[in-house]
Amino acid sequence: MKKLVSLLMALVLVLSAAGFAMAEGYVPGTYTAAKNGFGGEIVVTVTVDEAAITAVEITGEGETAGIGSRAVEELDDAILAAQSADVDGISGATVSSDAVKAAAADCIAQAKGEAKEVAAVAMKPGRYVEYVESFNKGDGLTVTVTVTEDRIQAIEVDTEHTSDMYIILKTAVDNLIPRMIANQSVTVDSVTGATVSSNAIKHATELALQDALAAAGTDASAIENFYVDLPQSDAVVELETEVLVIGMGGAGTAAAVSAAEGGAQVLAIDKAARYGGTTTLTCDVMAVNPPRMMELYNEGKEFVNEQELYEDWITYCEGDAKEELVQFMIDKSGEMLDWLVFDQGAQLSQPVVSWLSADNRFAVAASWLPPMWNNTKYLLGYFDSMIEKFTANGGQYMLETEGYELIYDEATNKVTGAKARSMVDGTEYVIKADAVILATGGYMGSEELQLQMLQNTYYPLNGVWKHYGTKQNDGKMWKAAMAIGAGVYNAAMPPEVHASSTASWLTTEFPRHYIDGMNSMVADRPAFWTEGDLPMYLGWCSDSLAVGPTGKRFASETGVALLDPWLPGPEYFSIWGEDQIRKIEAEGFDALNSTIFFGSLTAMPMGVPVPNVDAVLEAAVEAGIMVKADSVEGLAEQLGIDPAVLAETVAAYNGYCETGVDAEFGKPAQFLDPVKGENYYAVKMYSYAYGSCGAIDINEKFQVLKTDGETVIDGLYAVGTDSMGVLFSEKKPYVTYGGANNSWSLTSGRYCGLQIAEELAE
């Protein structure tokens, strides 16, 4: 009887919905609409029959994982159930939710055959200020929009009071805003290399225009007059040069500048709207005994024994590195640094022992000056100076121009150029060149290539990794090179991981605690911390128990914040007991490793009680950052781990805590804190990869090799991250001498450019 009643009630609801829809009148079919979300375009597809909405599909790859992504993943069912776009949004994801609902409403209107009436623009002239979230929640952008009665007159962005990195935000301000004003549009494409900042500026401007329209009493539909796409071109332009450099990060810029210095005709392109790439977001450059710096700082004496360094490197790589290229790096990186400092005007310190170095032996890490993370405006200035000299030597460059295909003559096995496309207006370029240098930053921005390249031969690497880096490094030219037979070298090497974190943060859901006289090292704004970062700090804490997806420990928890989180693969879990949580509530943390790249960008202080810990954990569980259970086995079931395995791991770890001896990984006794209590918690932590380390295969002349590892593809070269794996081994992670990635980028680019110029001159 209960089943029959339930069935009848369900039937009544369906018939009611169907009757309502029929009264409205749908034209059967599938309808699509797109709106700008927080991280890019969100596309909604709605399918209807005569009576009802039958399917809803939402896509939005750019939305923040765990925040905006929830709107993409969850609102389809809500819209389908309600048979309407008028549904509740996802808490904390207003922008993404509004975009989904607006696009769904557009689809439904299309299905009803309703003609869209858009009011004419009539705004109250003035200045309108809006704050929107951007790269880091709670440290977004304040945007001031000045309007006349019918036009956007000016868009100003506060670039100081935000955690958006200066160099990235400036790229959006310099390139996006002029296009928005020229086209009177809030829907122009975001600037590559500054996508999140661009989306924030567009969203704030749209809100300000809505305010101006409302102030004039104009119907809200008038905002659609500002939904204008940039005109696209179908032109195909042929260009010719001696040297084509694809990518203008550290490696590509060094190659282009050096080739032009050598007298070659050079054209450099980059898909981003800025040059400098990942190099402008770093702190160290490895340099082995730069001669002029030895004279200046060390009385002409060597900073380090080169032979010892070489032997240490080769031993570390277990015979897998290309020894001649490791030797080249050691021989030439010092001269490269001298060139940067004394010839190009960059400022770097003398080489010292890196803070990452495990054995404290090799003084090879030179820091950009001023030091550390909030120096990006200075690094941009160094690249400005290099590009000025490049153009003075006849070099040309094109930004927002993406290379996507190599021009290859299979009969002669020679690359004779490349095809590229404007990211702004779609213009196609066919570029003929005697030499093509790939300097595109590796493949970590491509989930497809991550899954293809990262295998489980030595470590559980296969999967999709969180990426804390420049998203335009998507390996498109890797695929182009492999399509003509290029080989790879150590392609499955572990990615370069400098940090771990949760997928999303609760930073702004709890009060800020400012630290007097201190600025954030990353954002260069007043430093603060909040209890909302507690889950992330639990995942970093040395007192924790960390397990991989199998339920087993993978390292001493003293290293999970920075150097070791990659060991179990893209994800790990931090396990805590109720007793530990109550101790933090009363006394705060007594041991804490932390990074400065996520959440409030500032470490929570040790020894400070957290009285609202329950509210934080409840919010974290609701957000999907954590799970909670009344037993270890219950926790395991929620995590998808074998309950018996996790229970065994916890029992063994608690035994180490009792004896004070970690028999597995040797964690010091002061960090051994038993996992016990009435309830148990797990923080979902992720390894954030800075970049890929595997390589397109090259020889000692930087020439790309075919899959046999011997045959040269004539005219094709690879430098920087695109070829860095030749220095390493798939059996080991990236080295910790300090700045090896930057050094290889700048050194390989410098000498590849010089070499090609010399060969062309012969």
Image: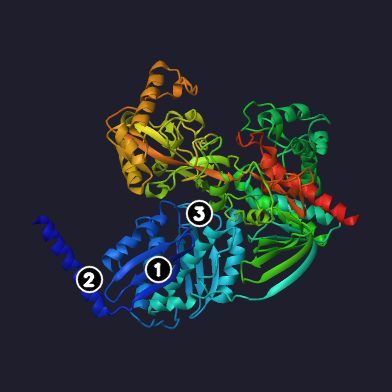
The kind of residue tagged 3 is Phe
User: What residue is shown with label 2?
Assistant: 17
Instruction: In this rendered view, identify the residue nearer to me: 465 or 142.
Output: 465
Q: CA distance from mark 2 to mark 1?
A: 20 Å
The kind of residue tagged 1 is Thr
User: What residue is shown with label 3?
Assistant: 135
Q: Position of residue 474 (x, y in %)?
A: 59, 54
For residue 45, the mark is 1
Q: Position of residue 607 (x, y in %)?
A: 42, 30
Q: Position of residue 322 (x, y in %)?
A: 73, 37
Q: Secondary structure at mark 3?
A: loop
Q: Residues within 10 Å of mark 2 (few under 14, many from 20)?
A: some
- Number of marks: 3
Determine which quarter of the picture holds residue 535: top left
Q: Is residue 462 left or right of residue 95?
A: right
Q: Is residue 668 left or right of residue 437?
A: left
Q: Quadrant of the N terminus?
A: bottom left
Query: As drawn, which residue projects farthest toward the right?
Result: 762
Closer to viewer: mark 3 or mark 1:
1
Closer to viewer: mark 2 or mark 3:
2
Do callouts 3 and 1 mark residues in contact (Cβ within 8 Å)? no
Q: Is residue 745 left or right of residue 629?
A: right
- When the figure is inspected, residue 24 is found, relative to residue 454, above or below; the finding is below
Instruction: In this rendered view, identify the residue nearer to me: 661 or 2.
Output: 2
- When the figure is inspected, residue 213 is found, relative to residue 670, above or below; the finding is below
